[in-house]
Amino acid sequence: MAVTGVHAVSALGRGAEAQLAGALAGVPAFAPVRRFDVTGRRVGVAATAGDVGPLAEELADAVDVACRAAGLDRAGRRESALLLATHGGPVTDGGPEVPALGGWLADRCGLGGRTRVYTSACVSASTAVADAATMIGRGDVTRVVVAAGYLVEPDQYALFDAGRALATDGAARPFSAGRTGLLLGDGVAAVVLEAADGRGGEPVATVRGWGRAGDAYHPCQPDPAGRGLARAVTAALRRAGLEPADVGYVNANATGTGLSDAAEAAALRAALGEHAGRVPVSSTKAVHGHALEASGLLELVVTVQALRHGKLPVNAGWLGPDPACPLDVIVDAPRPAGSPYALSLNAAFGGANTALLVGAA
C-alpha cells in the first residue's frame, strides 16, 4: 500500500518535517505541565505542545493537511474511508463525544466512505493502519485516511502517575540503564493510504507488511519472553516477503519502563535472530513522549520521514547499556539509513502487540 500523505503535531512542532527534525536533534520536549494542575503528583512533566487547540479541531486540521498532501480533491475525499484512533473516555474540551467524533470528523473533512473508531489503548493507531492495509489489500476500498489523536489531559495523567509508571527523574530513557518510567506527550497525526495501483500519485512510503498478536500474559506486565510482539514482527515480515536481515531500522515501542523494554528486546531477538544485535534501534518516545492511542501513527510518521531522508533518529536519555537489552541502540548522533525497510512497533496493556513494516518510496 502506498502512503501518499502524512501530517503530525506533537511537542516537537507542527508538520511531519518537524517531527523528524526533533527526533534527529534528540532533544527531549518534556517540560513542567501547565495545562492542568499537577500539584500533589509524583511527577509533573510531559511533552505538551503549546499551541494546540481542541482535539477535534486538531484532528480535522491533520486530516485536511494529509489529504492536501496526497492531492485529494473533493471527489477523492468522498471516496475515502476514515479509521480514527483516540481515547474512549469522556471528552473534556467541549468537542463531540466518542464515538460520535468519528462521524463528526468524516463530515467535517468530507470523507464519505465507511468510518470506524479505535479505542484499544496504545495499539489503537497501529491497529487502524493494519486494518486499513487489509481493507485495501483485499479490494474493499482503494483509499483510507487514518487519523489519531491524544492530548495530555488530567485523567490519564493521574492514572499513570498513581500507577507509578511515570519517570521520576523527568526523562524517558528507552533501553537505557537507570530508566525509571515513561512520560506522556501530545500526538495528533493523519496519513492517507492508497492502493498501489490507485490514482498513480507520488507515494512518500509504502506499508509492506503488518502483524498483530496477543499474549494475554498479564493485565499490565508484558510477557518477559516477548512472544506476542515476536509473532507480530514475524507476521509483518512474512506478509512483506522480507527476511530479518532486510530490516534496517526499528522504531521501538520502548517506553522507558524496565519490564517492557526488556521484553521488547527479547521479542526482537526471537523474531530477528542474530540480526537483532545488528539492526539500529531507537524509540522516539524519548523525545516526543508516549501519545497513548495516537502513538502508533505519530511514530509511523517519524519512521516514514526517517526513510525518506535516509537518517535514523537517536535514542535520547541514554545513560548506558542494560544487559537485559542487548541491542544496537542509536546514541550520540543520527545514523544514515542502510536499508529501505523499517519496523514501527507498539504494545499495550493486556498483551496487545503490533508491528508495521514500512518501505521507502
Image (cartoon, grey):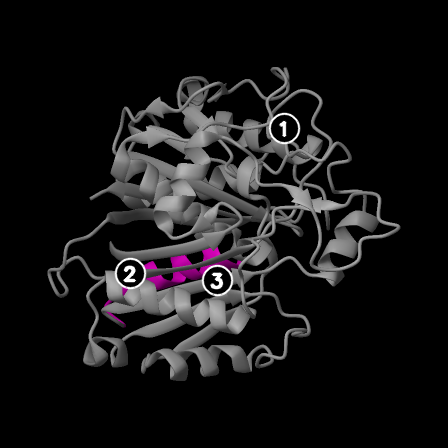
Q: Which mark is residue 148?
A: 3
Between the C-alphas of marks 3 and 2, the distance is 14 Å
Residue drawn at (43%, 64%) of the image: 147
Q: Is residue 238 left or right of residue 117?
A: left
Dominant secondary structure of the magenta stretch? helix
- Above or below residue 319? Residue 182 is below
> Left of 184 or right of it: where is 44?
right
The residue singled out by tag 2 in the image is 193
Q: Is residue 133 magenta?
A: yes
Q: Quadrant of the C terminus?
A: top left
Which one is earlier in the sequence, the residue at label 3 or at label 2?
3
| SS category of the residue bearing label 2 | strand
Q: Position of residue 202 (x, y in %)?
A: 15, 54
Disc 3 residue type?
Ala
Quadrant of residue 340 within the rendered picture: top left
Q: Residue furthest right?
A: 40
Q: Which residues are magenta?
A: 124-140
- Real-space Cα distance between discs 3 and 1? 27 Å
Q: Position of residue 263 (x, y in %)?
A: 62, 32
Which residue occupies 48% across, 62% down?
A: 148
Query: How far apart are the two marked residues, 2 and 1, measured between alpha carbons?
Result: 33 Å
Task: Please say if 298 is above or below 22.
Answer: below
Q: Is residue 139 magenta?
A: yes
Q: In the depicted view, which residue is nearer to us: 65 or 355?
A: 65
Find numbered disc 1 in the image and state the secondary structure of the residue it sits on: helix
Mark 3 is surrounded, within 10 Å at the Cα level, by few (under 14), some (14 to 19) or many (20 or more) other residues, namely many
x and y, in percent, of residue 228 in the image = 55, 42
Q: Position of residue 113 (x, y in %)?
A: 32, 80
Q: In the picture, residue 64 is in which quadrant?
A: bottom left
The residue at the point 58 percent across, 61 percent down is 120
Write down the residue under mark 1.
Answer: 262
Direction from residue 89 to residue 333 in the image, left or right: left
